[in-house]
C-alpha cells in the first residue's frame, strides 16, 4: 500500500498515535500538544505494551500512526499489509529517502519500499567513567580501543579493578554482551561485515566473529580487570552499574554501557562534575556508533494522518523537547538544529551520532535485526555460556550456535 494524498481528504479531526511506555514520554506528549495547536487537530497518544502486536490484533482500531521500537516490527507489519509505504512522503520539502543514510532506510524497507521514518536515535557505543577516580590514573589511554584495554590491564596487574560490568537482567541476561560484541565488530571490521552478521549471511563460526569474541574474552577474563571478577556479569543486575561506578568504596571507574546507563544514575550525581562519557575508542573504523531508535509508521492513510507524520519527522519536531534540561532527545532528521539542545550530555551524544550518520557509520543493534529466536535468545545464551565456561569454550559454542541457526 502506498500513500496517496489525492485520494483522501480530512475525514477526521483526531489523530491517534500509539506507542510503548518510554523515558521522557511526557516531553513527547507536550510536543504533541503544541503540534495539535499548530495543525488545528487533536492528537492523542495512546500507550500500549507492544505496538506491533496491538496493530496486528486490532485491525479495525482507529490508529493513525505508531511508534515501533524495532525495525523487525516495521517490516513484519509491512509484510502483513498493516501499514503504508512512505516512498512518496515529503518532509520539509525533501523526499524521506534523502533524510537518512542507507542503513536506516534499508532496515525499515520491504520489497524496495520504505515503511518508516525515524523519530529519534539512541547511541550505545559509550564508555562511562567516574571523574574523580579516573583522575587518579592519568595513564589510562582513550586514544584507541587497544590502548584503553592495555592501559587498564596495567592497573589490573596492580590489583586495581578498573571496570564495572554488572550485566544480570533476568531471562534477558546476555544482551549487554551483544552490545559489546556489536561495538567491536563494527569498529574492527566495518559496516559491510556488520550488516552481513545482522542478516546472518555469515555465521557464528566465521573467523571474524570468532576474532571479535576472542578479543572480548581478553577483556572479560583478564585477572582483576572487572570489579569482583567476571562473575559479576551474570551475578549483579545491570541497573546497579551507576551506583557501583560512582561509589568511592569500589575501585572500578569505567563502564562499557549504552545510553540506558543514564537512566539509573542517582540525581545527586552531575555530568562533567561527577561522571563523564566518551564514545568507544576505535579499532579500525572511526566514527562508528551502534544504537537503537524509534521508528514511525503510518497505519491510517488519510490527509490528516499524513500531515501529522510529516510534522513528526520534520527538522522542527523536538525543539521544545530538546530544550528540557534533562532531555535526551536526539532527532534522526539530519537537518535538526542541535543549538536547541540544552543538556550538554545530550549535545555530545547528538554530535557523535550525527557524525556517524553522515558517513553511514551508525548501525542498528544487530541482535534486534536478527530473527528474534536468535538475536533475543540463542545469542544471549551463547554469550553467557562463554562467560561461565571460559575462553577455551569459544570454538565449541560458536560451532554449536552455527548448527542451531
Image: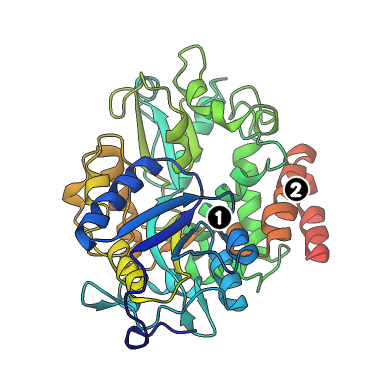
Query: Dot 2 lies on which element?
Result: helix
Mark seen at residue 381 = 2
Res. 252 visible in picture: no
Q: Position of residue 345 (x, y in %)?
A: 30, 38
Q: Position of residue 126 (x, y in %)?
A: 43, 43
Question: Relative to the observer, which residue lies in front, 361 or 372?
Answer: 372
User: In this view, which residue lies farthest toward the left?
Assistant: 339
Which residue does the image show at 33% across and 78% down from the upper left? 89
Vertical position of residue 123 compared to residue 276: above or below: below
Which residue does the image show at 43% across and 27% down from the upper left? 265
Q: Which marked residue is nearer to the observer: mark 2 or mark 1? A: 2
Vertical position of residue 90 compared to residue 223: above or below: below
Which residue does the image show at 41% across and 47% down from the upper left? 281
Query: Dot 2, crowdedness within 10 Å: few (<14), some or many (≥20)?
Result: many
Res. 270 visible in picture: yes
* Residue picked out by circle 1: 182
Amino acid at each position: 500500500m502506498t500513500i496517496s494524498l489525492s485520494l483522501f481528504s480530512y475525514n477526521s479531526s483526531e489523530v491517534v498515535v500509539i506507542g510503548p511506555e518510554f523515558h521522557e514520554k511526557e516531553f513527547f506528549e507536550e510536543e504533541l500538544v503544541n503540534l495539535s495547536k499548530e495543525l488545528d487537530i487533536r492528537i492523542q497518544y495512546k500507550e500500549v505494551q507492544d505496538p506491533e502486536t496491538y496493530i496486528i490484533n486490532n485491525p479495525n482500531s482507529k490508529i493513525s500512526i505508531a511508534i515501533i521500537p524495532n525495525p523487525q516490527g516495521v517490516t513484519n507489519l509491512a509484510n502483513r499489509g498493516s501499514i503504508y509505504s512512505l516512498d512518496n512522503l515529503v518532509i520539509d520539502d525533501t523526499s524521506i529517502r534523502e533524510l537518512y543514510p542507507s542503513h536506516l532506510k534499508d532496515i525499515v524497507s520491504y520489497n524496495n519500499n520504505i515503511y518508516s521514518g525515524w523519530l529519534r536515535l539512541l547511541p550505545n557505543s559509550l564508555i562511562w567513567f567516574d571523574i574523580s577516580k579516573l583522575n587518579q590514573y592519568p595513564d589510562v589511554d582513550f586514544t584507541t580501543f587497544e590502548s584503553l584495554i592495555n592501559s587498564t590491564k596495567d592497573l589490573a596487574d596492580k590489583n586495581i579493578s578498573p571496570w564495572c560490568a554488572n550485566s544480570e537482567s533476568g531471562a534477558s541476561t546476555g544482551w549487554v554482551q551483544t552490545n559489546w560484541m556489536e561495538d567491536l565488530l563494527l569498529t574492527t571490521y566495518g559496516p559491510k561485515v556488520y550488516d552481513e552478521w545482522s542478516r546472518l549471511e555469515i555465521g557464528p563460526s566465521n573467523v571474524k566473529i570468532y576474532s571479535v569474541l576472542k578479543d572480548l574474552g581478553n577483556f572479560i577474563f583478564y585477572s582483576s580487570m572487572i570489579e569482583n571478577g567476571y562473575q559479576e556479569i551474570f551475578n549483579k543486575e545491570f541497573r546497579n552499574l551507576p551506583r557501583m561506578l560512582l561509589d568511592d568504596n569500589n575501585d572500578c571507574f569505567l563502564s562499557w554501557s549504552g545510553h540506558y546507563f543514564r537512566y539509573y544514575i542517582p540525581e545527586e550525581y552531575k555530568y562533567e562534575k561527577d561522571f563523564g562519557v566518551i564514545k568507544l575508542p576505535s579499532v579500525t573504523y572511526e566514527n562508528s556508533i551502534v544504537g537503537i531508535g524509534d521508528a514511525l509508521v503510518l497505519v491510517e492513510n488519510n490527509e490528516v494522518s499524513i500531515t501529522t507524520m510529516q510534522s513528526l519527522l520534520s527538522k522542527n519536531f523536538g525543539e521544545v523537547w530538546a530544550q528540557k534540561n534533562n532531555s535526551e532527545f536526539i532527532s534522526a532528521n539530519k537537518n535538526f538544529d542541535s543549538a536547541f539542545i540544552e543538556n550538554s550530555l545530550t549535545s555530545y551524544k547528538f554530535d557523535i551520532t550525527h557524525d556517524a550518520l553522515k558517513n553511514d557509520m551508525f548501525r542498528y543493534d544487530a541482535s534486534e535485526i536478527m530473527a528474534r529466536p536468535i538475536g533475543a535468545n540463542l545469542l544471549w545464551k551463547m554469550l553467557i555460556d562463554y562467560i561461565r565456561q571460559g575462553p577455551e569454550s569459544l570454538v565449541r559454542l560458536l560451532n554449536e550456535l552455527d548448527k542451531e541457526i
